[in-house]
Amino acid sequence: MFDPYAILGVSRDASQQEIRAAYDQAKLKYDLDHVAHLGPELQEHFKAKALAMDRAYQMLTG
């Protein structure tokens, strides 16, 4: 089950500002430019994480 709150690491009563801050922090953590030197498998892992973060953010902010 996809839980956007768990993906972003915020509580269910998080404000829009908290959600945005968690999303911004996650974007930095999973930025593909930062893992360009790693192998393809790790790059795919980070890409999947980044996509999950984007999906979670969209679900919570509509």
Image: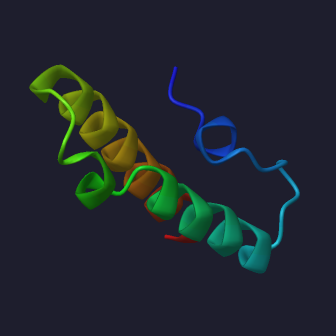
Q: Is residue 40 above or below residue 17?
A: above
Q: Is residue 14 left or right of residue 33?
A: right
Q: Nearer the viewer, residue 47 or 51?
A: 47
Tell me residue 36's x, y (percent).
Answer: 18, 48
> Which residue does the image show at 24% across and 59% down from the upper left?
33
In the image: residue 24, left or right of residue 13 = left
Task: Please name the residue shown 67% across and 62% down the image.
Answer: 22
Q: Residue furthest left?
A: 40
Q: Residue furthest front?
A: 37
**Residue 58 % position (x, y):** 45, 63
In the rendered view, would you say 6 is above or below 50? above
Drawn side of residue 5 relative to residue 26, left or right: right
- Residue at image coords 11%, 27%: 40
> What residue lies at 50% left-to-right and 50% top-to-bottom?
56
Q: Is residue 47 above or below residue 44?
A: below
Q: How many marks?
A: 0
Residue 49: percent from left, percent from top: 39, 38
Side of 6 relative to 29 (left or right):
right
Vertical side of 32 occupied by 9: above or below: above
Q: How was the colour assigned to the protein in this rendering?
A: rainbow
Please provide percent x and percent y for residue 20.
Answer: 64, 73
Q: Nearer the viewer, residue 28 or 16?
A: 28
Q: Nearer the viewer, residue 2 or 49?
A: 49
